[in-house]
Image (cartoon, rainbow, N blue to C red):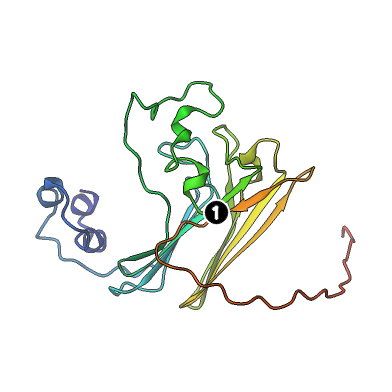
């Protein structure tokens, strides 16, 4: 509907690749607007805290998405500092998808329960996304927001940094995640978590298919000099 209304062939190019699941996809298309391949391969949507990244628009292109924004934004999940990755039509790093919109199940329950029952569903809670649990618990539904700090995009390297420490109540003071893509095939996720006491951290990774872990190199301690100057 948006692509047809704006006469945007690039938007229609994307929607026309999707499987037809509703009559609306046929009724709201505009055959007079020709499909044109988009030229943009990365974008940052600051208000909602979402960045999207591609290595092109071929059928087997790689796509990555990163989320770190307002917890109480409309339709938001407890998924700050989470990511997804697909290659062509293969979903690699995923989230748990949607759950039934059932009133009787508490899906729309936003009362002052801690947490609201809506976020007892894995698809909405932190457990269903590629983020972190602290002491077995995920993020909280409240005003504190995550935010995307630096964002970079070029032909060879994309990276984005999210700060979501405030989304865990008093359990964390700092949760910064670096999501780095050295194109075409190498992704690196680096986390820095800080708390005022000993905590148990769990790294959640939802995926399709099987995983193989390569042997890790022995950890090396490298002496370094820290400059504590405030100038």
Q: Badge 1: how crowded within 10 Å, few (<14), some, or many (20+)?
A: some
Position of residue 120 relative to residue 89, above or below, is above
Position of residue 126 relative to residue 184, above or below, is above
Residue found at x 42% / y 36%? 74
Q: Is residue 38 visible?
A: yes
Residue found at x 15% / y 47%? 22
Near-viewer residue (212 or 147): 212
Near-viewer residue (74 or 8): 74
Residue found at x 65% / y 41%? 166
Quadrant hosting residue 90: bottom left
Residue found at x 55% / y 66%? 159
Near-viewer residue (161 or 150): 161
Quadrant hosting residue 179: bottom right
From the image, tell me which residue sits under label 1: 204
Relative image position of residue 75 (x, y in whole percent): 40, 38
Relative image position of residue 122 (x, y in whole percent): 45, 42
Question: In the displayed structure, does residue 173 sit left or right of residue 107?
Answer: right
Relative image position of residue 170 (x, y in whole percent): 70, 36
Q: Is residue 45 visible?
A: no
Question: In the displayed structure, does residue 38 sit left or right of residue 135?
Answer: left
Question: In the displayed structure, does residue 202 sit left or right of residue 174?
Answer: left
Quadrant hosting residue 76: top left
Relative image position of residue 23 (x, y in whole percent): 11, 46
Position of residue 42 relative to residue 20, above or below, is below
> Which image quarter is the C terminus in?
bottom right
Question: In the displayed structure, does residue 180 sit left or right of residue 7?
Answer: right
Q: Please state the total of marks drawn on the protein image.
A: 1
Element type at marker 1? loop
């Amino acid at each position: 509907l948006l692509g047809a209304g704006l006469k945007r062939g690039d938007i229609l190019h994307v929607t026309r690749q999707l499987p037809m699941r509703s009559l609306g996809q046929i009724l709201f298309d505009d055959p007079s607007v020709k499909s044109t391949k988009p030229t943009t391969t990365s974008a940052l949507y600051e208000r909602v805290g979402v960045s999207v990244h591609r290595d092109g628009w071929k059928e087997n292109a790689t796509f990555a998405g990163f989320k770190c924004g307002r917890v109480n934004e409309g339709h938001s999940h407890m998924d700050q500092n989470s990511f997804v990755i697909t290659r062509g039509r293969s979903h690699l790093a995923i989230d748990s998808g949607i759950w039934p919109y059932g009133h009787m199940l508490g899906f729309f329950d936003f009362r002052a329960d801690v947490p609201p029952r809506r976020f007892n569903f894995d698809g909405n809670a932190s457990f269903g996304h590629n983020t972190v649990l602290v002491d077995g618990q995920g993020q909280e539904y409240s005003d504190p927001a995550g935010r995307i700090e630096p964002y970079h995009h070029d032909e060879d390297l994309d990276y984005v940094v999210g700060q979501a420490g405030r989304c865990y109540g008093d359990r964390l003071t700092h949760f910064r995640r670096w999501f780095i893509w050295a194109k075409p095939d190498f992704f690196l996720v680096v986390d820095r978590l800080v708390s005022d006491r000993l905590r148990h951290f769990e790294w959640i990774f939802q995926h399709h298919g099987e995983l193989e872990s390569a042997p890790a190199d022995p950890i090396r301690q490298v002496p370094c000099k820290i400059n504590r100057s405030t100038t």
